[in-house]
Image: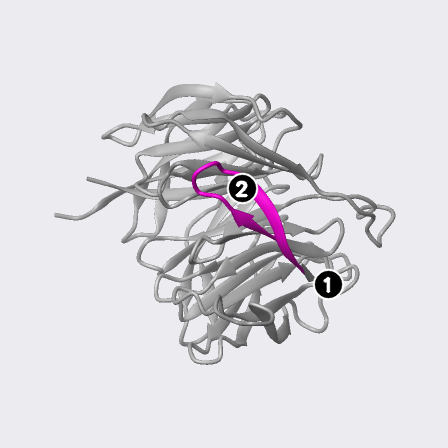
Amino acid sequence: MDKKYVAYAGSYTHESSNGIHIYDCDVAKGRITEREEVAIDNPSFITFSHDKNFLYAICDQGVSAYAVLEDGSLELMNVASINGMRGCHICVTSDNRFLVVSGYHDGKITVLHINADGSVGFIADEVFHKGIGSVAERNFRPHISWSTFTPDEELLCVCDPGIDQIKLYEFNHVTGKLKLYDIIRSQQESAPRQIEFSQDGKFAYVVCEMKNYINVYSYDKNSDKDRFDLVQNIFTVRRDHKSNSAAANITFDSTGKHLLCSNAGDNTVTIYKVDSKTGKLSSLNSLPISGDYPKYIRLFPDDKHLMSMNNEGNSITIFTVKYDKGLIIMNGPELKISRPNNMIIKELK
């Protein structure tokens, strides 16, 4: 029996979208078909609990919690305030006891309890970033764009492109409290936007939005000096790219042997091969995604097809990925969706 998958896409709702779009996935063909739409104000990011029984969505009111039903439909559980401006990213602890909201507009990290039934509970901690960035037009104040736990979950890594820093916080798994541990200072005006770890936990990959490159760090939790050590800096775009380009989003294939990075402005996806021993990347190719501002990219569960969420092009474009040749080939017509932000996929039992 073929496995069945359902995809969920969050989208801004100030134009024609109602919120979260639910799609049935045909993994073999690399296509998705819209099933229904769940009304919610501006879900700028959605994610699952680690068991994928619950979906959490940023919304104007804070964070919405949904139970994921057997057929993949969503049932609203509750909405919790984050005591601040609308967030842009959520991450969840592996024990599903806490979730962390990154605040781009107000530069705030908010930690919330998750109740035993999966609904969102009260605020455990709030931390405002302080400081002045180097680009007055945009980076003149803190903007938190992404937060990810280290593989051991001892530290929370918080990307702040507004002040060119990744702040590392000790995380108390009993109280949800944060304590500043260290700071990774990125290059001036680089704007570190997103951090992801390799499957073995030995390397970290940081997308630097404004400089259009990825910083690769080795990670050693037992190091006496710095846990993070920079081992590579590699561009996400070709030498002749558009000057208004911004590195947007990275994702690994399920084997961890390839990494893909989308580039806004340039409107491309770059495919890299990953050296598992050194963590270093080698670029295979950079190709257009046939849409405007690929804010987020997502591979199908079999790694054979890639979806690009084109936020300003109001579309999702899908490609067949040929890793051995470093190619992406358009797979069918674009799908229309107003201002898509990100996508997550769940296998139905």
Q: Label 2, on which residue?
A: 315
Q: Label 1, on which residue?
A: 211
Marks 1 and 2 sit apart, C-alpha to C-alpha, by 26 Å
Q: Position of residue 112 (x, y in %)?
A: 50, 31
* Residue shown at 32% from the left, 53% from the top: 301
* Residue shown at 74% from the left, 62% from the top: 242
Dot 2: what SS?
Answer: strand
Residue 249 visible, this orientation: no
Dot 1: what SS?
Answer: loop
Side of 35 where 104 appears, left or right = right
Q: How is the image coloured?
A: one colour
- Going by the numbered disc 2, the residue's amino acid type is Ser
Q: Which residues are magenta?
A: 168-183
* Residue shown at 54% from the left, 41% from the top: 315
- Check residue 92 for magenta coloring: no
Q: Position of residue 76 (x, y in %)?
A: 39, 20
Tell me the crowding category of disc 2: few under 14, some 14 to 19, or many 20 or more residues within 10 angstroms, Cα based.
Answer: many
Q: Position of residue 95 (x, y in %)?
A: 35, 42
Quadrant of the image containing the C terminus: top left
Number of dots carrying numbers: 2
Tell me the crowding category of disc 1: few under 14, some 14 to 19, or many 20 or more residues within 10 angstroms, Cα based.
Answer: some
**Mark 1 or mark 2, whichever is nearer to me:** 1
Q: Nearer the viewer, residue 179 or 308?
A: 179
Q: Position of residue 294 (x, y in %)?
A: 58, 50
* Residue furthest out toward the right: 136
The disc placed on residue 89 is none
Q: Is residue 309 above or below residue 252?
A: above
Q: Nearer the viewer, residue 64 or 326?
A: 64
- Going by the numbered disc 1, the residue's amino acid type is Lys
